[in-house]
Image (cartoon, helix red, strand yellow):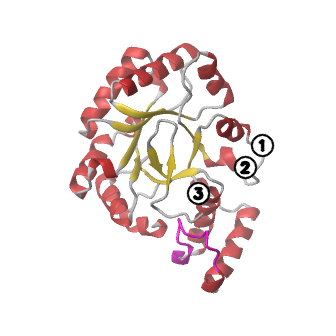
Amino acid sequence: MSLTIKSTVQLTSGHAMPLLGFGVYQNYNTRPSVLTAFAAGYRHVDSAQAYKNEAEVGEAVRESGLERSDVFITTKCISKTHGYDSTLEGVDESLARFGFDYIDLFLIHDPFSGTERRLATYRALLDAQKAGKIRTVGVSNYGVKHLEEIKSAGLQMPAVDQIEACSIFHCHLNERPIVDYCRTHEIVVQAYCPILRGKTDNPVIQAMAQKVRTIIAAPHQRPHAFHPIDLARARSRSDTHQMVLAERIVLHHFFLFLQICPPSKVGYFQ
């Protein structure tokens, strides 16, 4: 399978989601960064109510000249806002800040509000989906226990569970019951912090990076799969390590977000 920045996955909601997304957590140059990401080919932006930059993402979409239907926008609600009525109000507030008629993917940001409020929040998002305000409902940082809670309540399962890359890999592709659970229940796993917050000194990652540098030195040997992240653009040892991590996650069929605040860095992962 050839993977590119334009590759998508079909969600259980019936909508397609771009494989590679641009995260804007702690991004203090949101509008120009998102515009640069769009210019580089990204079509998925991951924001959240707590990031306080939904308005800037919306501005970038309008300024880009892209059709709203050509971009995929994610946002999230954190536990302190959980509850049925407060979640419905939050959806409307997010729509107003973005300046959109709908949100492509709305996630419960975390599971820390307790069973009752978690389920009330989830029901509110499902109702917002029925009202056409949300196209796809998902969760973030949910474990098997939290997903089983939704299943036991007789509700439709989320289309997406966004979890930290470290939780998926532990650098050794094992101990990952949440991934197996999601695959069994047709829940797409998204990986955030795919470059492990810059901590790339693990010997396994270093060994992989060295192998990739050998491939870069002999481009004709590069495997066909090295497409979604252009490893030939690696400009330093650190960049190579980070690209290896991102590539490794993509090739294991996870869907990831890269958070690159300075616009000048966006092209590294084009």
Amino acid bearing label 2: His
Marks 2 and 1 close (CB-CB < 8 Å): yes
Question: Does residue 110 appear in this view?
Answer: yes
Q: In the visual, does 62 lie left or right of 220?
A: left
- Identify the secondary structure beneath mark 3: loop
Residue assigned mark 2: 170
Which residue does the image show at 64% across and 17% down from the upper left?
Answer: 152
In the rendered structure, which segment of residues is drawn in magenta? Answer: 222-234
**Relative to the observer, which residue lies in front, 159 or 139?**
159
Give residue 77's mark: none
Residue assigned mark 1: 175
Asked whether 227 falls inside the magenta stretch, the response is yes
Give residue 195's mark: 3
Crowding at mark 2 (Cα within 10 Å: few <14, some 14-19, many 20+): few
- What quarter of the picture does the C terminus occupy? bottom left
Residue 267 lies, with reference to residue 146, above or below; the image says below
Residue 264 lies, with reference to residue 177, above or below; the image says below
